[in-house]
Amino acid sequence: MTDVLAPKTLEELWSFLENEPEGKVYAGGTDLLVWRRARGGHHGPLICLERIDELKGVREEPGGLWIGAATTHRRLLDDPRIRDGFPVLAQALAVLGSPPVRNMGTIGGNICTASPAGDTLPPLYVLGAEVLLLFRGGERAVPVASFIKGPGLTALERGEIVSGVRIRYPAGFNRHHFEKVGQRKALAIAVASLNALMAVSASGEIEAVRLAWGSVGPTVVTSPEVEAALTGRPLCLATLREAAALAREVCRPIDDLRATAAYRRQVAGNLLLRLGI
Amino acid sequence: MWYFCMSRVILHQKTEIVIRACEELRRRIIGRAALILFADTVEDLELLPGRVRHLKTGKEVPLTLLASLMPPEDRVCISQFIMPVSRDGLDTGKAFVIGFPHLLFSYAAHLAAVEVDELTGALEVKAYFAATEAGRVINPQSFEQQVEGAIAQGIGYALHEEIGLHRGRIVNPDLATYIIPTAEDIPDITSLVVETFETSGPFGMKGVGEVCINGPLPAIAGALAAACGVWMNRAPLTAPRILAAL
Amino acid sequence: MRITFVLNGEERHVECLPDRRVVDLLREDFGLTGTKEACGTGECGACTILVDGETRLSCLMLAAQLEGRSVTTIEGLGAEGCLHPLQEAFVQCGAVQCGYCSPGMILTALALIKENPAPTREEIRKALSGNLCRCTGYQKIVDAVEEAARVTRGGQ
């Protein structure tokens, strides 16, 4: 028998975490419960975060938003502050999983699962998000690119949970682009994805750009070199083709049952061309 | 290809058998009712829901009573039917000659409108039209259900579905990894019925079970060729395969 | 573990293991076999139920999470001889073939119509994108949801 603990407050949570070192934390269960069923080996208690109000919601902060880790993707999609202020995140959430999965899955879960194909991750990278960690008596913040260390690996320490994510409004960018490539239109794990924030001048020059690719490396791929190759250049197919060739060199995809590395590499570059259309 | 036709053939065969068995049972029921109702001739008797009525007098006998008066052997009807096959002498198939080649086929004409993304190789079916000829249509809704369901499955076969094998083991044995279409992957399908009457078929029907599953792959492959000039000869037409061919 | 929750409008108390999957609790302990299991991993939607009005996958929910919640299964819709407009539309439009996906489809459509009384066919398809069907090709299911939405709006 497995104990399932559902704390209602952070105080209850800390006690559980201290008393149950083998415990695994979840909120929506769309990753952990699938993993647990497939692995069959975990028998320690489960700790469900979905009732802790302090971990849910969206709050305005100077220059950005705080999102509670146990906030479902659905809640975020329904929030006009996300839709209007963070289009790249909203577009990614809209194609994550499926409607019931979005009702259950949370942004904190997506971060902690740290899948190379996690749909919220490229937007969070391109937005320069900070992952907020809470433990009894303190908190710390880690940039998302440092928090996620590898497939399924994060910098989460014992006794800590991800309590939220802090994102800043992408000021100065006038193009917000997201594209996910999957094997079908819903219920699809990304085979490749591109998130881009661009500041394009009236004369069509790329003044600033931030890029993040998903599913083409062990973690989200970002590239100062590709960004530099685009900055100060006109936004046109010729520029994008050069950047695409560079992008294919910097990404590190693998073969898996969904796609080959060769396909992912080719598409990672091709997706840049979409920015010019 | 004959594999896909079998269930339609079996439908035709089984329906014929059922019809014949029912007709025999009906004869026995009417015959037994004639005795009970003292009818001079079976012509005056009508089988109605749950009973047999003698039309001249209006007298009725319930089926339950008739059944109780029939010995068990009389209440069971067994019938058989042999599917018509081609009588032409063939040069091939001499080792196994029963049941081949089939004589009756249903027909369909399919039209697929597709959009191909040249950056990713992804192909989307934007519209689909099917005209189907399967003899007489008894239940139009059922007919359409078969057409639409088969086309959706055919689109899955054409675009996404593939069993992956590694050293003899299936690497995608579940719904997460064996990709079938979702509601967003299938367009609205326009289905046109071309109704005929198959004289050798049960009530004029042929079978519509699976004829439409065969259409999507060639229709989509043809549309892909028309759109991009590439002829693919291996299904499914996944995005990686299409991108590599472009 | 003792759990109290509302099931199809009635308060229920049940003693069960806290990690019992909700799909098993509903089917085995409550005998409500309308909720189906096909994949058990959240990929197919056959196990869809409504929890506090929202669709959730009961194969990925544990009994302990039900405390204090309100659950609706397909059995909570309509009654023998008096079908819910969605059920009626599914029957009339031929949206049911083998029936395995139907309970999940209907509950998802119910949640959709409550939130969006006049959905377009595209919106319907997107709302149902988490419910797989192999028999129908989805067409008549979309027809049925459109029809049920029209009836619910008062026949306009």
Image: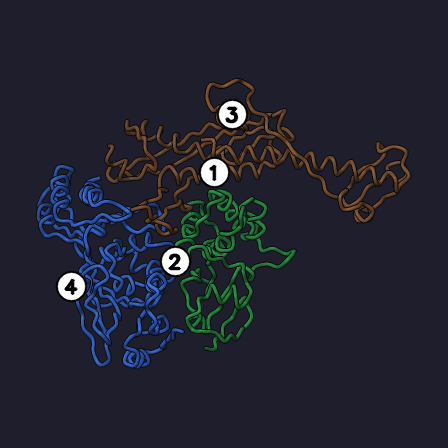
In the rendered view, would you say A36 is above or below B147? below
Q: Which residue is mark 2?
A: C41
Q: Position of residue B194 (x, y in %)?
A: 55, 27
Crowding near the residue tagged with mark 2, few <14, some 14–19, many ≥20 C-alpha atoms within 10 Å = many
Tag 3–tag 4 contact (CB < 8 Å):
no
- Mark nearest the camera among 4 and 2 is 2
CA gap between label 4 and label 2 equals 30 Å
Q: Badge 1 local density, few (<14 within 10 Å), some, or many (20+)?
A: many
Same chain check for tags 3 and 4: no
- Chain C colour in the picture: green
Q: Earlier in the sequence, mark 1 or mark 3?
A: 3
Whole-number angstrom distance, CA of label 1 to CA of label 4: 49 Å
Q: Is residue B59 left or right of residue A191?
A: right
The tint chain A carries is blue
Q: Which mark is residue B101?
A: 3
| Secondary structure under the numbered disc 4 in the rendered image | helix
Q: Which residue lies under the disc numbered 4?
A: A146
In the structure shown, which secondary structural element does the residue marked by tag 2 occupy?
loop
Residue drawn at the location 47% of the way across and 62% of the way down: C50
Which residue carries the number 1 mark?
B150
Q: Nearer the viewer, residue A163 or B91?
A: B91
Do marks 3 and 2 share a chain?
no
Whether labels 4 and 2 belong to a single chain: the reply is: no
Kindly tell me whether residue C113 is visible in this rendering. Answer: no
Quadrant showing the N terminus of chain C = bottom left
- Tell me which chain the residue with mark 2 is part of: C
* Labels 3 & 2 near each other (Cβ < 8 A): no
Q: Nearer the viewer, mark 3 or mark 2?
A: 3
Chain B, chosen colour in render: brown
- In the image, A43: left or right of C31? left
Residue at x 38%, y 51% (from the top left corner): B174
Tag in front: 1 or 3 = 3
